[in-house]
C-alpha cells in the first residue's frame, strides 16, 4: 500500500459519515426554523471546536494503539487551577501554570503507560477519576468566578466566527498535514507492532510519551477556552468529552489496537454528532437523548472495530514496518500507509 492510498473500507466510512451528516443537516434545516442561522451555525462550530481540539491528538494516539480517557477531567482541573490562582498570581502566570498542568498530566499518563507498563485505558481512567475528584475537592464542589478572561472563549474576530473555532481550524489543518507526513507514519507504525513489543524500544516509548503530552496540552487549551466562555472554573466542565472523542476517532476509521486512524474521518464523525446534538437541542428534545445517541454511536463504533481487530494479521512484514519507523537512521518504511 502506498503512502497516499487508502483501503476501500476507510473510503466507504468517510462517504457514509459525510452522507449522514449532509442528510441530518438538510433534515434539520427543513424542520427547524432556527437551525440555519448564523448564530446557531457559529454555536455548532464552537461545539465541534471544543471536542475537536482534543480529538486531533487522540487520533494520533489511537494510531499508536493508545487511548486517553482523562482529557475531560484534565480540562476541568486546568480551569479550576486557572480560576483559583489568577486572583493572587495574576492572569498570565496563572495561564502558564494551567498550561504546565496540562503538560504534566500528559507526561504522567505517558510515563504510566510506557515506564509503568499500565494499559492506557486503565491508566487514563484512573487519571480521569483522580483529576475529576481534585476538580471538585479544590473548590469544595463550587464554581470559581474568573472575571477579565473572556476574550479567548467569546471573541469573534473574523466574519463572526468565534476564536475557538479558528484555533481548532488551524489545529485540524496542521493535524491533517501531519497525518500524511512522517509523524502520521510513525504513529501508525507503532500501532502495527505487536502489543508485547510496542514499548520495547526507547524510540517507541518516547514517541508515546510525546503524544500523551500533546494530548494533555490540548486538554489544557480546552480548559482555558471553557473557563473563558463560562467566566468561571467549573468542576463539571468537560464531562463526557472523552467518550465523544473516542467515538469520533473509532467511527472515523481508528482502531483500538492501533495501526490506523484518519484525521478527516474523525472530523466527519465530530461534525455528524454535533449536527445531531444541535438539531435535537433546537427541537427541544430532552438532553438525555443526546447521551443515548452518543452511547449508541460508541457501541456501533466498537462493533465496527471488532471484526477488523480479529482479522488483522500481525505478520512479520507488518511488524517490520513498525520497527523500521524507529531505525537509528530515522528512515521510515515507505510501505507504512500515510
Image: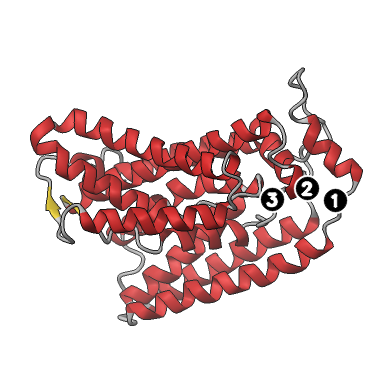
Where residue 70 appears, as percent x and y from the top left, is 43, 53
- Quarter of the figure that contains the C terminus: top right
The residue at which mark 1 appears reads as: 314
Crowding around mark 3 (Cα neighbors within 10 Å: few <14, some 14 to 19, many 20+) is: many
Q: Secondary structure at mark 3?
A: loop
Of the image marks 3 and 2, the number of the one nearer the N terminus? 2
Real-space CA distance between mark 3 and mark 2, rounded to the nearest whole angstrom: 10 Å
Q: Earlier in the sequence, mark 2 or mark 1?
A: 2
Question: Of 72 and 48, which appears nearest the observer?
Answer: 72
- The residue drawn where x is 72% and y is 68% is 306
Q: Position of residue 307 (x, y in %)?
A: 77, 68
Q: Give above or below for 226 relative to 199.
A: below
Q: Is residue 31 above or below residue 172?
A: below
The crowding category of the residue bearing disc 1, from other C-alpha atoms within 10 Å (few below 14, some 14 to 19, many at least 20), is few
Name which residue lies at 48% across and 66% down.
273
Closest to the camera, between mark 3 and mark 2, is: 2
Q: Say which element carries label 2.
A: loop
2 and 1 marks in contact (CB < 8 Å): yes
| Quarter assignment of residue 305 | bottom right
As helix, strand or loop, the secondary structure at mark 1 comes to loop
Query: Is residue 232 shown left or right of residue 27?
Result: left
As measured in the structure, the alpha-carbon distance from the residue carrying label 3 to the one carrying label 1 is 12 Å
Residue that label 3 marks: 258
Taking the spot 17% from the left edge, 44% from the top edge, the residue there is: 83
Counting residues from the start of the chain, the first of labels 3 and 1 encountered is 3
Quarter of the image for the N terminus: give it: top right
Tell me how far mark 2 sits from mark 1, CA to CA.
7 Å
On residue 194, the disc is 2
- Residue found at the very far front of the displayed protein: 116
Amino acid at each position: 500500500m502506498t503512502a497516499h492510498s487508502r483501503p476501500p473500507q476507510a473510503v466507504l466510512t468517510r462517504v457514509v459519515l459525510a452522507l449522514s451528516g449532509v442528510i441530518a443537516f438538510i433534515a434539520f434545516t427543513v424542520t427547524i426554523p432556527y437551525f440555519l442561522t448564523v448564530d446557531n451555525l457559529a454555536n455548532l462550530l464552537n461545539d465541534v471546536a471544543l471536542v475537536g481540539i482534543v480529538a486531533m491528538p487522540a487520533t494520533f494516539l489511537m494510531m499508536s494503539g493508545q487511548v486517553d480517557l482523562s482529557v475531560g477531567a484534565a480540562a476541568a482541573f486546568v480551569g479550576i487551577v486557572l480560576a483559583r490562582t489568577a486572583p493572587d498570581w495574576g492572569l498570565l502566570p496563572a495561564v502558564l501554570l494551567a498550561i504546565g498542568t496540562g503538560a504534566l498530566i500528559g507526561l504522567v499518563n505517558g510515563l504510566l503507560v510506557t515506564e509503568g507498563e499500565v494499559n492506557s485505558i486503565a491508566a487514563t481512567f484512573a487519571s480521569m477519576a483522580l483529576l475529576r475528584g481534585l476538580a471538585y475537592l479544590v473548590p469544595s464542589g463550587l464554581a470559581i468566578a474568573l472575571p477579565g478572561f473572556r476574550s479567548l472563549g467569546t471573541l469573534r474576530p473574523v466574519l463572526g466566527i468565534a476564536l475557538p473555532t479558528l484555533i481548532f481550524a488551524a489545529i485540524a489543518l496542521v493535524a491533517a498535514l501531519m497525518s500524511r507526513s512522517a509523524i502520521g507514519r510513525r504513529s501508525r507504525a507503532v500501532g502495527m507492532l505487536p502489543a508485547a513489543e510496542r514499548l520495547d524500544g526507547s524510540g517507541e516509548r518516547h514517541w508515546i510519551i510525546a503524544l500523551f503530552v500533546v494530548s494533555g496540552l490540548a486538554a489544557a487549551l480546552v480548559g482555558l477556552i471553557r473557563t473563558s466562555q463560562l467566566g468561571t472554573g467549573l468542576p463539571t466542565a468537560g464531562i463526557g468529552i472523552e467518550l465523544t472523542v473516542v467515538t469520533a476517532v473509532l467511527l472515523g476509521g481508528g482502531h483500538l489496537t492501533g495501526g490506523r486512524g484518519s484525521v478527516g474521518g474523525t472530523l466527519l464523525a465530530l461534525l455528524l454528532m454535533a449536527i445531531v446534538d444541535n438539531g435535537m437541542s433546537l427541537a427541544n428534545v430532552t438532553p438525555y437523548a443526546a447521551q443515548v445517541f452518543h452511547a449508541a454511536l460508541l457501541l456501533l463504533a466498537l462493533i465496527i472495530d471488532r471484526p477488523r481487530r480479529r482479522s488483522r494479521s500481525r505478520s512479520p512484514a507488518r511488524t517490520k514496518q513498525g520497527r523500521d519507523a524507529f531505525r537509528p537512521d530515522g528512515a521510515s518504511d515507505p510501505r507504512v500507509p500515510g
